[in-house]
Image (spheres, grey):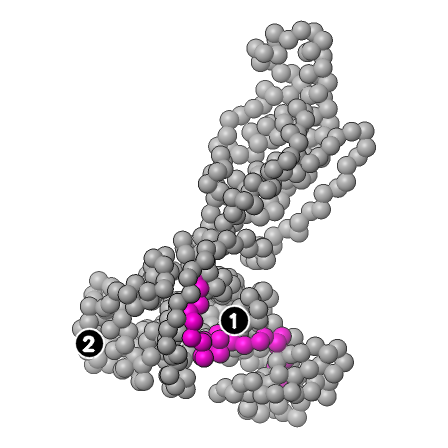
Amino acid sequence: MERYELLKEVGDGTFGNVWRAINKHTGEVVAIKKMKRKYYSREECVNLREVKSLRKMNHHSIVKLKELIWENNILYFVFEYMECNLYQLMKDREKLFSEAEIRNWFFQVFQGLAYMHHHGYFHRDLKPENLLKTKDTVKIADFGLAREINSDPPYTEYVSTRWYRAPEVLFQSHLYGSKVDMWAMGAIMAEMFTLRPLFPGISEADEVFKICGVIGSPTWESWADGLHLARSINYQFPQFPGVNLSLMIPSASADAINLIRSLCSWNPFQRPGAAEALQHPFFQSCYYIPPALRSRLTANRTPPPVGTRVSLQVQNGRRYPGMSDNRKLGVNNSSPRAVALKPGAQRKLNMVNQDSNKVAPYSNSSVKQPRFRPSGNNSPTSVIKGPMSREVADISEKLADMSFGPRKGPEMQQLPPLKAGGWRDEPVHAYYGQRHGQWIQPGRGYNRKVAG
């Protein structure tokens, strides 16, 4: 720890304190979490659930563990430094966040959750305090309660802060999974729209009461397992029809309301997973390319030579099964138009086709890997529907800029292969609308000490 200078305490939690610190050698600002309990062996440190989970996580939406220091029986986590958390961002705010801001932040968080769940972990303690922000970047932090999805139950009964605790956990179910994170995300998302917690219960019983008042009481059709759990502890649900979330969250769009409602479903099996949530229409604009940008990509382009067009048509016919087969295009072109050409014109066409065959390997090398393949949206102007439509546009753009001659063209840079089970950090092209600013009275009059 002699390499670091502690500057200021920025957080105090159940298990440790967080300090802003600086590396004396490099000048890098970091966050250091000092654990409160003592650790008497190195094995005890490396076997911590938080350590094991963080060492397996490498994603742009998950806070990065830079170093682990064990000194004088005290354990220190050295993390990348983030400016604030979402609770601090909401605490003294008067003006509502725009939907574009919320969409951008939650798109990143769901990406991190999808990565985490895919790699066999769920967080179990999602809340605004554990979502850290720097500029426009939001990352998931605090894996102290993270658990492997495939680990053997029973799990801990009381996990997560009460306001974001899923119903199956409130009713002491020993069998729960990654869908507890999705419930928390729905509650946090609603809070970001209103700057007020959605279910601010002051006890477990009051928490259930608040949930019933918002989404309505569960029925045998909506959550039979929950009614069995309640019966096992002699609990009787209060009877409420629920409220219209659109009236409760007036600044949210219909798509946002639909996503929040699905995330905050009584039955965990009816909640979408993180990867499924990323496909929701609410995030559609995160994959959207504006028409102005599309037109700029194709404006003032010189049409490709005839041979290039022939090569592209042949290639597309082979690559996309939904398109017509153009195998007849080539040197041995036997179309009626070709037969009717004069001998001189026919010789020129044959020479062009021979040139196209010479450059075919070069053009093929540029399309082995798609550069961008969004999973949530297809261009409305594309002739080819499906995830390949963007690739065709990229190929056309590249070929339009190519010139062929006696000199060998430069080699195209190849993208690294996508590893099995891996996640690509693709750029996000977002086009957001502008909402009029909405003002509310200063809020956040709730006590955040709700761990019990």
Q: Which mark is residue 162?
A: none
Viewer-proximal residue, 139 or 48? Answer: 139
Q: Which mark is residue 238?
A: 2
- Residue at mark 1 to residue at mark 2: CA–CA distance: 35 Å
Q: Which mark is residue 140?
A: 1
Viewer-proximal residue, 391 or 254? Answer: 254
Residue 60 visible in rendering: yes
Q: Is residue 141 above or below residue 2?
A: above
Q: Is residue 266 above or below residue 375?
A: below
Magenta span of residues: 76-99
Viewer-proximal residue, 12 or 46? Answer: 12
The residue that appears at 27% across and 76% down in the rendered structure is 210
Q: Amino acid at mark 2?
A: Pro
Q: Callout 1: helix, strand or loop?
A: strand
Q: Quadrant of residue 358?
A: top right
Viewer-proximal residue, 294 or 3? Answer: 294
The residue that appears at 52% across and 40% down in the rendered structure is 389
Q: Answer whether residue 87 is magenta in the image.
A: yes
